[in-house]
Image (cartoon, grey):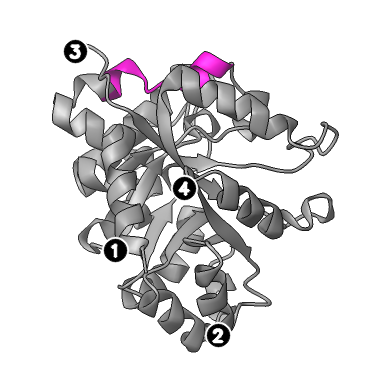
Amino acid sequence: MSETRAARADSHIHLFQHGFSAAEDSGAELATYLSLRERYGIDEALVVGYEGHPKFAGNNEYVLALAMTHSWIHPTLFLDPRRPPTPSEIESDRARGAVGYSLYLGADPELTAAIPRETWDALSHTRSILSVNASPEAVSGAEPRFRDADGACVLLSHLGLPGDLAQASAAEVQQRIAPISRLADAPNVSVKLSGLYATDPDFPHTAGTHVARELIAAFGPRRTLWGSDYAPGLNAVSEPELFALPGPIREDLTEDELESVLGGALRAVLAGARI
């Protein structure tokens, strides 16, 4: 089918003051994305905050400041599960322009237990977006928390980080993504079609495309969101590849479904998070 001309919305980008390399001029990474945004017709972007390394300290304040002058930027602030925000801090962050938080669980199935119930309740109460980087093991461990926080919108980044499946059999793929697919019946959980290169490094990421098609079938096009993974993904693939949605995924979708995956689904999430 022909490529949709509707404006895109990017569900997964990073913006660091001195770039992902931490060696760029201040604001250079933003300037590059501004040109890419125009080239690919992107009108909204969810910024995934990250402060998990000392070189990225202060990223939360940086993206909040950017959002004040760029209405298309929607920041999720880095949430350290070992120092989770209090309910009053969550209210304050939301009032300052954050649409939610980014949570990095890695492969640790126990890490969500460090976040108290009152924080989960506040995330749900404020209808916060929670962008989650977690392996299937960590998703499985967090499943009860994700389901209970049903007022929040949980977005599982990078297909749920199933790992490199380039040589995996169909049965192995199904087993690996089972903890992700299991959440398809939770209406507050969606999945991002981002980081396909981490599942299969060679474009068009055949294994990643297979996983994406399985997850679209499970979650539906209204709960699957395309994301570029700018700028870290540029270390793995070229710019056109990073911003592409592989053909086999497109071919599965009607025009309306494609427009949802490429933008409508994220816009609906953002609308639901407004307070």
Q: Residue at x 62, y 48 (%)?
A: 66
Residues at discs 3 and 4 in contact (Cβ within 8 Å):
no
Marks 2 and 1, how far apart in space?
A: 23 Å
Q: Which mark is residue 88?
A: 2
The N terminus lies in quadrant: top left
**Label 1: few (<14), some (14–19) or many (≥20) C-alpha neighbours in 10 Å:** many
The residues colored magenta run 239-249
Q: Residue at x 28, y 36 (%)?
A: 261
- Which numbered disc flags the more N-terminal residue, 2 or 1? 2
Kind of residue at disc 3: Met
The three-letter code of the residue at mark 1 reads Asn
Q: CA distance from mark 4 to mark 2?
A: 27 Å
Of tags 2 and 1, which is closer to the observer? 2
Q: Earlier in the sequence, mark 3 or mark 4?
A: 3
Task: Residue 263: name its quadrant.
Answer: top left
For mark 2, give the secondary structure: helix
Q: Check contact, mark 4 vs mark 2: CB within 8 A.
A: no
Compared to 159, does 64 lie above or below?
A: below
Give how far apart the Cα atoms at labels 2 and 3 are: 49 Å
Instruction: Please report whichever mark, 2 or 3, sits nearer to the chain's N-terminal start.
Output: 3
Q: Which residue is nearer to you in this view: 35 or 176? A: 35
Residue 105 visible in the shown view: no
Q: Where is mark 4, residue-wise?
A: 157
> Quadrant location of residue 70?
top right
Query: Is residue 240 shown left or right of residue 27?
Result: left
Q: Which mark is residue 188?
A: 1
How far apart in space, not on screen, are marks 1 and 3 (Cα)?
30 Å
The x and y percentages for residue 88 are: 55, 85
How crowded pointer 3 is (Cα within 10 Å; few <14, some 14-19, many 20+) is rated as: few
| Comes first in the chain, label 4 or label 1 | 4
Q: At numbered mark 3, what does the secondary structure look like: helix, strand or loop?
A: loop
Does 190 sit above or below residue 17?
A: below
